[in-house]
Image: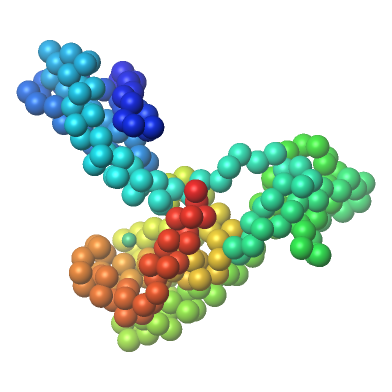
Amino acid sequence: MEERSVKYGKTTIWYGLVRTSRRTLGFVVHTDARVEMRAPIQATAEEVDRFVLRRAAWIVRQQDYFRSFLPLTPPREYVSGETHRYLGKQYRLKVHATVGREVVKLSDGRIHVHARHPRDAAHIAGLLAGWYRPRAIARFEQGMDIAMQLLKKHKLARPEIIVRRMSLRWGSCTPQGRIMLNPELIKAPGRCIDYVVIHELCHLVHPDHSTAYYNLLDRVMPDWKRWKERLEQQSA
Ligand SMILES: [Zn+2]
């Protein structure tokens, strides 16, 4: 696949160009915001660029929409002074060298990491992940308690929560009725976590995003849009 780009105002739209036996130009915007153009063998690259430009407004809108679901975190160095989030609040990281037990503690508004290899970013990242994880599991289960209560009359079996790193989504549900949640979600405000759990649980009643689905979501969490937006800002 050929990688190309076109300038649209201040935005650069990157796209992959695939040549096919089709007779017309077409494209897809994937859920990870990649754009793939499919073009006839004889179309020139300039023709394809012009086609992308004509559809640019729509493509960018679509990309923004999909990106709003991408849990992006800026690259981290895991050094003292860096800010890390927990339940919607920012905490400064303080890395201490220790020869004893390695421990992570939240106190006086900071996350203290006592580490044997304080300059090893991957090591600090691992210690922090080990601190976040049980807190994520506990808070996600609490979100599930809330969601189950709100959807009580649907008599759903309480789904199993699977905490799994996903690069593209905060949450998803499987046809077997399991709910997968991104551990990164523990960095967002608690109500954002509730929103994701409620959103997924509503899918066990309506698997699609139909009007019936949104009616249900509106009924059980009338202010869900507010938390969805918070979550989108979170990922920016
Ligand atoms: Zn959904």
Kindly identify the residue that appears in the image at 87 percent across and 53 percent down: 101
Tally of marks: 0
Q: Quadrant of residue 110?
A: bottom right
Q: Quadrant of residue 42?
A: top left
Q: Is residue 62 visible?
A: yes
Q: Is residue 109 left or right of residue 14?
A: right
Of the four image quadrants, the one with ligand 1 is bottom left
Coloring applied to the structure: rainbow
Q: Work out whether 192 lies above or below 30.
A: below
Kindly identify the residue that appears in the image at 47 percent across and 45 percent down: 167
| Closer-to-camera residue (1/162) | 1
Q: Work out whether 187 lies above or below 48.
A: below
* Residue placed furthest toward the right: 99
Q: Is residue 38 visible?
A: no
Q: Quadrant of residue 220?
A: bottom left
Quadrant housing the N terminus: top left
The image shows residue 10 at horizontal and vertical percentages of 38, 32
Q: Work out whether 24 lies above or below 112.
A: above
Kindly identify the residue that appears in the image at 76 percent across and 57 percent down: 111
| Closer-to-camera residue (165/118) | 118
The image shows residue 5 at horizontal and vertical percentages of 33, 23
| Closer-to-camera residue (25/7) | 7
* Residue placed furthest toward the left: 23
Q: Is residue 146 left or right of residue 172?
A: right
* Residue placed furthest toward the front: 9
Q: Work out whether 107 lies above or below 79.
A: below
The image shows residue 29 at horizontal and vertical percentages of 27, 39
* Residue placed furthest toward the bottom: 153
The image shows residue 134 at horizontal and vertical percentages of 64, 63
Kindly identify the residue that appears in the image at 51 percent across and 71 percent down: 191
